[in-house]
């Protein structure tokens, strides 16, 4: 019957059920045993590979935030990029590649400062000097690190902010200063260390050479901008004579060529809209640049209105030390004259070649004069720098941005005319060449020339003053030359110079583990 068959089937399955329960119990006992074994092994740190013990002096004389990270060397890419922090000289982690050993470890992060590699200090070392330290490691690489989060926490009190002042400040002439005795006077170009910005109106700062001394009050960026804005309408609505500046002369033999008509038109457009785009000069953030003896010299750019003496100052510099100073050779599309030499007076090129250079952005500035192109190229600057000389450029201030990079590190000198009374006394009988291509156009300065010179200088300083490193008033050409030469000599001899933070100087190092040779190092300089 069906019931009997069911009982018989159930009875037949019992031995198999018993065997299954016995096997399940054995499996459970095995899992529990191995789970307990793993727990004990982890608790007793009984696992492979065995890393060497941390040296007893690893944390000696270090801050609490320092940590030791040991990575086992495998065939897997390390995936880390490092760079040298130019403001502190420290070696820091610039980038962590996703999927690399550093990323998977979770122990190394961007911004971490590397203090040691395998027990060797990285102080005063360059990124490329770390390569042998990594290559010598066999089984593991040990880093001593200051974590980035700790550096950020300490930044509120220990990070130093340096600025270059772009205006003169005399607290004795400031009626709104809270306390004159607590104020700090400074001149344009001074490097200041900002120690407090908690007050929106008055910052606390000290001079670079007196960073260990007491701080003083200086106007904040916002306060100075408000003051300039309040003073601007007085000059903005004052009647001004806007016309083509007289006596414009541009020497491409010493750096550039531009037509009088083009310069006059540019001045008219500029004067019409300059006030709408003025950014009051206040402070610019700077960082120390440590120049090495093998580094190329900084490019020196002389700017100023026509007739102020820029070309004469450059000519005197070249004569005074031709082994130190050099000038660019401009490009032109006109025919070579009998007395001229290719590569000495000009680079003579076709119109097609010149326009190709324009399209590839190879010119700092260029223009058309009497149907021919003239221009100063970036390549010509590189040639002078490659000779180990200081390249002297004279350019319109609007073109400074073309070379305002860490590649050229320009030092910009603004040559400024004196007051119009002094111009009348010193240049009334002076002559100048209005057109270098036609030396017969020689005449003396007129009253209109003086007014145009001062007018243009004021606009240049107002709009581009934040780019000027040095301002020289050319009341007397001999005195101005001595001041310029002395200043340039100091810049070239100084080991530490202060440059804008927007310039970056670092060497990036990429380390990648190799399957065959343990490590391949690729260095990218940027």
Image: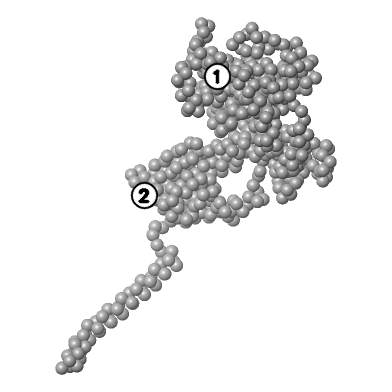
At x 68%, y 16%, the residue is 247
Residue 221's label in the rendered image is none
Question: Left of 212 or right of it: where is 107?
Answer: left
Pick whichever of labels 1 and 2 is earlier in the sequence.
Answer: 2
Crowdedness near tag 1: few (<14), some (14–19) or many (≥20) residues, C-alpha within 10 Å: some
Calculate the distance from the C-alpha at mark 1 to the C-alpha at mark 2: 61 Å
At x 53%, y 49%, the residue is 112
Residue 61 position in % (x across, y down)? 60, 51
Residue 368's label in the rendered image is 1
Residue 127 position in % (x across, y down)? 50, 40
| Camera-side residue of 352 and 16 | 352
Residue 245 position in % (x across, y down)? 68, 20
> Quick one: quadrant of the N terminus?
bottom left
Is residue 444 in view from this perspective? yes
Give yes or no for contact between labels 1 and 2 (Cβ–Cβ under 8 Å): no
Question: Left of 299 or right of it: where is 36?
Answer: left
Q: Which residue is mark 2?
A: 75
Residue reaching furthest top?
A: 338
Closer to the camera: disc 1 or disc 2? 1
The answer to whether residue 333 is above or below residue 462 is: above
């Amino acid at each position: 019957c069906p019931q009997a068959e069911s009982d018989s089937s159930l009875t037949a399955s019992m031995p198999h059920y018993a065997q299954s329960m016995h096997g399940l119990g054995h499996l459970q006992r095995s899992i529990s045993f191995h789970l307990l074994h793993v727990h004990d092994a982890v608790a007793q740190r009984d696992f492979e590979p065995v890393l060497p013990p941390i040296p007893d002096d690893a944390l000696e004389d270090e801050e609490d935030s320092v940590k030791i990270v040991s990575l086992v060397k495998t065939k897997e890419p390390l995936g880390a990029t490092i760079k040298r922090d130019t403001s502190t000289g420290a070696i820091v982690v610039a980038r962590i590649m996703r999927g690399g050993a550093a990323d998977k470890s979770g122990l190394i992060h961007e911004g971490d400062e590397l203090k040691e590699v395998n027990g060797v200090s990285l102080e005063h070392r360059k990124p490329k000097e770390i390569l042998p330290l990594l290559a010598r490691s066999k089984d593991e690489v040990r880093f001593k690190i200051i974590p980035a989060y700790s550096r950020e926490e300490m930044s509120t009190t220990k990070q130093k902010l340096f600025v270059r002042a772009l205006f003169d400040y005399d607290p004795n002439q400031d009626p709104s200063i809270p306390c004159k005795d607590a104020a700090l006077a400074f001149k344009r170009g001074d490097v200041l260390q900002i120690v407090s910005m908690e007050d929106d109106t008055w910052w606390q700062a000290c001079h670079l050479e007196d960073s260990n001394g007491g701080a003083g009050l200086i106007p904040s960026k916002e306060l100075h901008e408000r003051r300039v804005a309040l003073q601007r309408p007085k000059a903005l609505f004052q009647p001004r004579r806007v016309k083509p500046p007289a006596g414009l002369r541009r020497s491409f033999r010493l750096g550039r060529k531009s037509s009088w008509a083009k310069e006059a038109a540019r001045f008219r457009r500029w004067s019409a809209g300059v006030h709408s785009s003025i950014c009051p000069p206040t402070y610019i953030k700077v960082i120390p640049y440590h120049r090495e003896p093998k580094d190329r010299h900084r490019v020196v750019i002389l700017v100023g209105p026509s007739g102020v003496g820029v070309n004469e100052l450059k000519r005197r510099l070249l004569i005074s030390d031709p082994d130190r100073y050099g000038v660019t050779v401009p490009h032109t599309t006109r025919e070579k004259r009998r007395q001229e030499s290719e590569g000495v007076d000009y680079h003579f090129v076709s119109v097609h070649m010149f326009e190709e250079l324009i399209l590839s952005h190879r010119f700092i500035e260029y223009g058309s004069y009497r149907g021919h192109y003239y221009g100063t190229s970036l390549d010509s600057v590189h040639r002078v720098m490659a000779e180990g000389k200081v390249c002297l450029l004279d350019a319109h201030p609007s073109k400074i941005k073309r070379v305002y990079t860490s590649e050229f590190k320009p030092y910009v000198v603004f040559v400024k005319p004196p007051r119009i009374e002094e111009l009348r006394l010193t240049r009334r009988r002076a002559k100048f060449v209005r057109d270098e291509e036609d030396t017969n156009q020689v005449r003396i300065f007129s009253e209109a020339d003086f007014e145009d010179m001062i007018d243009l200088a004021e606009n240049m300083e107002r709009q581009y003053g934040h780019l000027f490193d040095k301002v020289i008033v050319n009341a007397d050409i001999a005195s101005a030359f001595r001041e310029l030469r002395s200043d340039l000599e100091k810049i070239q001899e100084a080991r530490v110079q202060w440059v804008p933070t927007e310039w970056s100087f670092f060497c990036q190092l990429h380390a990648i583990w190799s399957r065959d040779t343990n490590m391949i190092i690729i260095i990218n300089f940027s």
